[in-house]
């Protein structure tokens, strides 16, 4: 029994003394930190080696291997979904809207059905679609519920007249 009590420094009284010691140590540390703060070097003492500016960065070794950002990549689709879409019928419609920065838009089907979602990765060809472009497409269900459809293999068949069209590389063409 005595060994247990000895390790605890006399029960409650030892704990109170421990708190006093702790608060004393904290106050010493805070006074030491303010004095250490006063001794920090002046901003003039900190400088960069000659020939280096603050905005300069060393060239990345991967710089020559980067893929351009406007290049759309295919979304991961199961093999069976890709096969079903490819073997399905081709539909036609008109691009209702498309936002390149958001990466998606909608197509209004020629048969008057509900609007169909289109993702940037499913657009074929060199032009970014704009409202009024006539398109052909195939459809594929949208996971996980497979209740809605999205357009895949989207091709622009006629550019909307009187509008500016942008290529994926950024060139603007009048149609």
Image (cartoon, grey):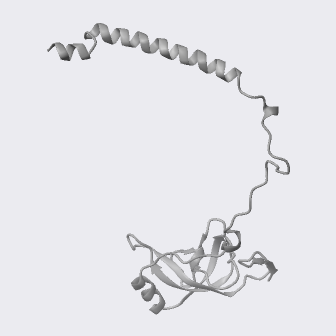
Point 46% across, 86% down: residue: 85
Q: Position of residue 22 (x, y in %)?
A: 43, 15
Can you tell which quarter of the image residue 48 is in? top right
Can you tell which quarter of the image residue 95 is in? bottom right
Residue lying furthest right in this view?
51
Left or right, residue 51 beside residue 93: right
Nearest the viewer among 2 and 26 is 2
Q: Position of residue 134 (x, y in %)?
A: 65, 84
Judge whether 59 appears above or below 129 on screen: above
Point 27% across, 9% down: residue: 12
Left or right, residue 106 beside residue 82: right
Left or right, residue 5 beside residue 138: left
Nearest the viewer among 109 and 87 is 87
Q: Quadrant of the N terminus?
A: top left
Left or right, residue 27 beside residue 49: left
Q: Position of residue 146 (x, y in %)?
A: 39, 74
Can you tell which quarter of the image residue 171 is in? bottom right
Residue lying furthest left in this view?
1
Q: Quadrant of the C terminus?
A: bottom right
The mark total stands at 0
Point 60% across, 18% down: residue: 32
Nearest the viewer among 70 and 173 is 70
Point 43% across, 88% down: residue: 83
Residue lying furthest front in this view?
3
Q: Position of residue 133 (x, y in %)?
A: 68, 81
């Amino acid at each position: 029994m005595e060994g247990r009590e000895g390790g605890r420094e006399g029960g409650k009284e030892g704990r109170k003394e421990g708190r006093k010691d702790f608060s004393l140590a904290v106050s010493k540390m805070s006074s030491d930190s303010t004095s250490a703060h006063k001794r920090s070097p002046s901003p003039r003492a900190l400088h960069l080696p000659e020939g280096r500016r603050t905005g300069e960065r060393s060239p990345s070794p991967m710089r020559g291997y980067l893929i351009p950002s406007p290049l759309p990549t295919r979304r991961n689709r199961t093999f069976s979904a890709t096969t079903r879409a490819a073997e399905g019928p081709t539909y036609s419609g008109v691009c209702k809207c498309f936002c390149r920065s958001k990466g998606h838009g909608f197509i209004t089907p020629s048969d008057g059905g509900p609007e169909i979602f289109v993702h940037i990765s499913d657009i074929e060809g060199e032009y970014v679609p704009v409202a009024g472009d006539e398109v052909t497409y195939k459809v594929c269900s949208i996971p996980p519920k497979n209740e809605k459809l999205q357009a895949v293999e989207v091709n622009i068949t006629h550019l909307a007249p009187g509008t500016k069209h942008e290529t994926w590389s950024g060139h603007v063409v009048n149609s």
